[in-house]
Image (cartoon, grey):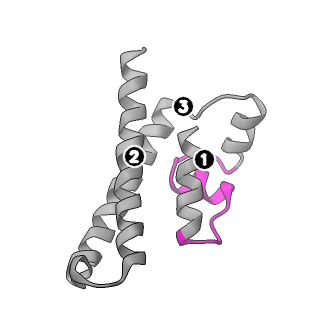
Amino acid sequence: MIVDKVLEHLRHRDNTLSKSRFAVEYLGKDRSYLFVRKHRQQDISNDALLRLYGELVGSNAAYEQFYEERDLAHSDNAAYRRDFEASQQLCEEVLNEIKNRAMNA
């Protein structure tokens, strides 16, 4: 599931990010939301997926501004470059999941 991939990526940036905090801050849901979904073997809802996409795009825009302000595109700091590119890729993957769900609805 895409939500697991996103959570793993975000935990790479912030190792204090719990599933509960992720559900509240990124999905706009109750702290137990992901636990209930996993127990029921259900993917996250469409509204949670849309909220996640919005949060990722906002976060990516802030990260992009930071990236450009510090001229990291021309820097040798490969870690920043990889993280920025991974963040962009996640946004695209979540958007593709939204499109797939819309086409299959």
Q: Is residue 55 left or right of residue 26?
A: left
Q: Residue furthest right?
A: 39
Q: Is residue 24 magenta?
A: yes
Query: Residue sitting at 33 percent across and 70 percent down?
Result: 63
> Where residue 31 appears, x then y in whole percent?
67, 51
Query: Residue sitting at 27 percent across and 84 percent down?
Result: 75
- Residue 90 versus residue 62 in the image, above or below: above
The CA distance from mark 3 to mark 1 is 14 Å
Q: Are marks 3 and 1 in contact (CB under 8 Å)?
A: no
Q: Earlier in the sequence, mark 2 or mark 1?
A: 1
Residue with the mark numbered 3: 45
Specify the amino acid type for callout 3: Ser
Q: Circle 3 sits in a helix, a strand or a loop, which is it?
A: loop
Specify the amino acid type for callout 1: Asp
- Residue 25 versus residue 53 in the image, above or below: below
Q: Which mark is residue 22?
A: none
Q: Are marks 2 and 1 in contact (CB under 8 Å)?
A: no
- Rendering quarter of residue 56: bottom left
Residue with the mark numbered 1: 4
Magenta range: 13-31
Q: How many marks?
A: 3
Looking at the rendering, in which quadrant would you find the C terminus? top left
The CA distance from mark 2 to mark 1 is 14 Å
Query: Residue sitting at 67 percent across and 61 percent down?
Result: 18
Residue with the mark numbered 2: 53
